[in-house]
Each structure stands twice: as C-alpha cells, then as structure tokens.
Image (cartoon, helix red, strand yellow):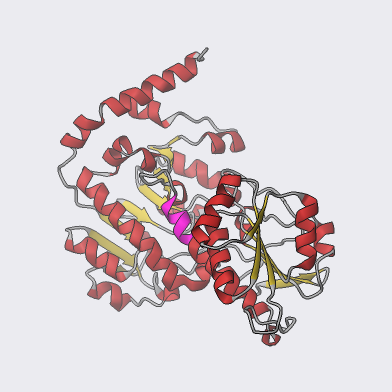
Amino acid sequence: MMSSSDALKSLAREASLSTQTEMIEMGKRKQSLFIGIPKETELQEHRVALVPEAVGLLVSNGHNVIIETGAGETANFTDNDYSEAGGQIVYSNKDIYNADIILKVSPPSVNEISLMKHKQILFSALQLSIQPEDALKKLIEKKVTAIAWDYIQDEDNLYPIIRSMGEIAGTSSILIAAELMSNANNGKGLMLGGVVGVSPPEIVIIGAGTVGQLACKTALSLGASVKVFDNSISKLRRLQQNVGQRVFTSIIQPKVLLKALKRCDVAIGATRAPHGRTPCVVSELMVEQMKKGSVIIDISIDQGGCFETSEITSHQHPTFIKHDVIHYCVPNIASRVSRTASFALSNIFAPLLLEISERGGCKKLIQTHKGFRHGIYVYNGTLTSSFLGEAFNLPYKDLDLLISEFN
C-alpha cells in the first residue's frame, strides 16, 4: 500500500512529466547567459571549470563570460588566453559574483558564499564528506539554486563528469604507483611492466567501477599482473568485457583479499559510495601483513578511504609510510593533471550551458531534464537533498513537488 506522502510524490512526478512537452515548446526562446568563473581557493584544486576554447564557444553563441584574473594559472592558461577567446578578465572576486551563473570546480567556501547574490545559480562539486553545515545554510538563506556537477546524470543515467574524472584518476593511479616503486622515490626498485624472464609486479584493485577499469587497463597494458575485487558481479563482468582479456576477479571475501594483498606490490582503493563515507574494506591488520615497500594508493580517500590506515595527504607531501607500506592518499588526483582535467570538465560544462540557453534558462532545464534535476540539492533556497537534510537535521522538500508548485 502506497503511503500518502509517496502517492503525492508520484503524482508530482507525473505532473512534471506531463507538462514537459508544452514547456519544451514554450522554452525554445534562447536565453543569453552571464557566466562567472572564479579563481579556485581550495588548497589542492588546480583545475578550472572552463578552458579558453570553451569560453570562445560560449561567447560566439552570444553569452557573456567573466573570468577572475589568475583563474586558469594552475592549469597553465593565462588571462590573455581567455581575453583572446572573448572572455572578460576581472580583478576582484567580488565582481565575479555579479554573474547570474557561477561555475566552480570545488565547493564554495563560506566567504565565497557571502559574496554571492540572491537567487544566483551555482555549479560546483558537492563533496558530501566535507560539506560544512554553515555553507549549506548560507546557500539556503540566499535562495541560491545549487547544482552538484558530480551528481548530474546523462540520458543513460550515468554520471558523465564523475566518469571523466574517474578515467583520469584510474590511469594516473598506475603512473603514480610506477613512480613510487622506483629507486628515485626510495621504492623497491621495481619497474611496473613486463620484462622477459622477470616476474611482473602484482596489482590488487578494489573496486570495478570506472576508476578500477581504467587502472586495470593501464596496468595490463604495461604488463603487470592484476586482480580486481568488487561486491558487484555485474561490475566485475562489465570490467572483464571492457578490458578485453581475462583477469582475476573476485567478490570482496576477506580471506581471498588478504591472500592477494600479501602477495601484491601495489594495492589501489577505487571504491565509491553513492552517499556518505566509503566502506572500510582493508583493515589495519591486513595492511600489516603486506610486503615491505609495497604501495597503497587510496583513490577513495575523497570519501574517507577504503584502507583503515589511510590518512589524507597533499600534492606537496603525497605519501607517508605505515607498517613499512608506502601510502599515497591525495584527494582529487585529477587535479594532479589539471590541464587535462580542465579540458575534460569543459567538454561537459560547455554543451550543458549551451543546452541551458537553448531551453530558455536553467529553470526550464530543471523542469524538463530528469538527469539534470538529479544534481540539484538546493532549489531557490529550498533544500531538496534528503541525504543532506538528514545528515544536518535540516528540513528538505522533494524537488518534483517544488516543480509542480511552481507550475
């Protein structure tokens, strides 16, 4: 028996879907966008939301893009690159927040939110594990519409930006492991690759999602021996198909995983939780039994880490040694290759912004695009994320109900 609350939500969803055809027709009037790109202030964030080529595309389509001076420096884009593309350079972060749409990579700080104007539209990562309650309350107070780019879905119900950043992180993890095993970095002096007559290094990957798949592909291409663990048989099967060759796969059984960890030279944590903290899969006792000089790369550290011994490190000081095992636990690995990552972000943001314009504005896209709605966590100052509401004990409302009310 459906509860009255569930029935109401179901009716609201039906209503929002039934009005989509009419809204698409009415929303054909193209809207000019005013977009602001602030300089990222988070310590380890080197990416920029739009590269100069994307700015040029938007400007040529009639949009106004302002960029805070130095916003692209850490990704090796100069102010001149942006101005030549048609963007306007501003020299005060206060001026950036005059834009109607703020496009950021990392979540805004409390200070940045204080500069925002009422009913502004914000695109940024959500990063639930570090989302401060004060920042969330201030977004609500300013009646901002906040969109988490890491939760936007495409037409196949996939997360395009998470997938793109995951591809970078998965490939980078193997390259990082190769560096850490070399003598130049006080490693064991192993080469991550196959040489005739020499046993290849063994790599354990925990997680068979996008990150795990790319890590597996890269390791195999170098000639390493790979074992992949995940609790989803469908993910393991998909990895096996996408990799194109047979690799050892297993569900996460502690005894089998421990046996693999004892033998491996590199262990990569690539699990991702849909909400909240990543489950801790490898205990400290298991780490103690790994080989001396072996390497752990915990990509899941963004969500708390899947190794019990993991502690957050920085790009400046990326490693520490515990139980004679080298740990690399830098959040946001994609920022390590900021120029590549910025192009990857831009390839998704620019078409999305053009679609917002074609639909007649951000609200129109929210009303008609289910995958885009999935990224909304504050709508006109109303919290719409049940997870955030429950985590911070704040009132929240179903987004479909809000949309039906506005209609």
Magenta range: 159-165
Near-viewer residue (307 or 389): 307
Total number of numbered labels?
Answer: 0
Q: Nearer the viewer, residue 378 or 306?
A: 306
Residue at image location 84% in from the left, 58% down from the top: 285
Q: Quadrant of the C terminus?
A: top left
Residue at figure coordinates x 39%, y 72% from the top left? 72
Is residue 227 one of those drawn in magenta? Answer: no
Q: Position of residue 14 (x, y in %)?
A: 34, 23
Along the horizontal axis of the image, is 295 left or right of 332?
A: right
Does any portion of residue 46 appear in the rendered image? yes
Q: Quadrant of residue 216?
A: bottom right
Instruction: Residue 274: name its quadrant.
Output: top right
Query: What secondary structure prevails in the magenta region?
Result: helix
Looking at this rendering, what residue extends furthest in the bottom direction? Answer: 184
- Give above or below for 141 relative to 65: above
Can see residue 96? no
Considering depth in this image, is 3 or 35 the residue closer to the camera?
A: 3
Where does the image place residue 319, in percent across and percent down from the top left? 69, 72
Q: Is residue 66 left or right of residue 331?
A: left
Q: Residue at the spot x=32%, y=75% of the render?
A: 79
The image position of residue 153, as x and y in percent, is 41, 45
From what the image shows, is residue 272 above or below residue 373?
Answer: below
| Image location (x, y in percent) of residue 273 | 60, 47
